[in-house]
Amino acid sequence: MLVYRGFSQAVPSATVLTIGNFDGVHLGHRALLARLTAAAAQAGLPAAVLTFEPHPREFFAPDSAPPRLSTLREKLELLADDGVDSVHVCRFNAHFAALSAEEFIQRVLLDTLRVRQLIVGDDFRFGAGRRGDFALLRDSGERLGFQVEAMDSVTLAGERASSSAVRDALHGGRLQHAARLLGRPYSIDGRVVHGEKLGRQLGFATANIRIKHEPPPLQGVFAVEVMGLPGGPHRGAANLGYRPTANQVKRPLLEVHLFDFCADIYGAHLNVRFLHKLRDEMKFADFNALKAQIASDVEAAQAYFKL
């Protein structure tokens, strides 16, 4: 999959395009991507995605923007898995936000991305003040020579599959429901870094993963499955949060204890899948209480996998 940043020059081929934030790449997104790749194959053109960095809500209201479900890297990996040929990452800044809907159509869709067919979600809005809508796209397509198609929302048991619904499920510890909305378990990627070796002192060595999700969409202690190591997947227990008992950290830290595993994995890039929430993160009176609780958490996670 090719990844482009900015709009300095036109792409080499006309495209079949979709546009969106694609945070989490849930079932609604995946239905849109399936339609995109099918239409692109029929037209003999690349299947292209236009997405934004940062998320527009992070630009307009950084203090109240919702937690991200996926980093840019994670999103790109998921889009590649769904058969996308190229992704165009638009830097969402004041200049881009000021583009009128008509300028967006001409300068971005036509002059740069050479759109031949555009497929968007049924709630898609664009341009300064979000004044652009499907009707404007359809009328512009008829006038300027590109096709426009709207996709209906995907619902599960009457609930619309959306990034907001996934966030609500993760925040509430309903990981199986989040997995149904995503079409896979929710996961976080990250590289193993050196820590303070507190897990070893407590008898439970952990792989420490610094994550970019700030704040993370879920916190607590979980039964997890880890990809990215030989012989995987590997099962374990993980704490995601700010470690309130032992040297509290300012940025979220993911600490993963792998069952029956002993190897030097510093620098490894792991994918941690969250399968079941065991409890919320909490502060303990001392290290002995923390150690006893970790032992109980590990036992509970092992019991989960035996079900």
Image (cartoon, rainbow, N blue to C red):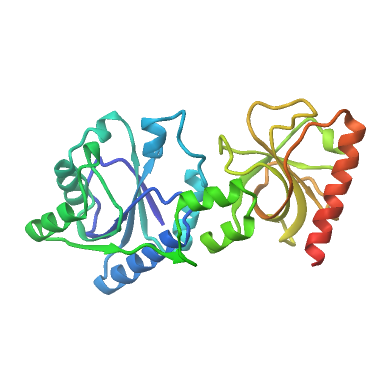
Q: Quadrant of residue 220?
A: top right
Q: Quadrant of residue 120?
A: bottom left
> Which residue corresponds to the image point at 23% horizontal and 58% vertical from the top-left?
13
> Which residue corresponds to the image point at 78% horizontal and 31% vertical from the top-left?
283
The correct choice, above or below, for 99 with respect to 43 in the image is: above
> Which residue corresponds to the image point at 75% horizontal and 32% vertical from the top-left?
195
Residue lying at the far front of the rendered structure = 158
Residue lying at the far bottom of the rendered structure = 42
Q: Is residue 46 left or right of residue 273?
A: left
The correct choice, above or below, for 201 with respect to 166 in the image is: above
Q: Is residue 104 left or right of residue 279?
A: left
Across and down, in percent, residue 96 comes to 26, 35
Q: Quadrant of residue 244?
A: top right
Q: Is residue 118 left or right of residue 69?
A: left
Across and down, in percent, residue 251 comes to 63, 30
The correct choice, above or below, for 67 with respect to 134 in the image is: above
Across and down, in percent, residue 287 comes to 89, 31
Location of the C terminus by quadrant is: bottom right
> Which residue corresponds to the image point at 42% horizontal and 34% vertical from the top-left?
58
Q: Is residue 262 visible?
A: no
Across and down, in percent, residue 184 comes to 57, 62
Q: How many marks?
A: 0
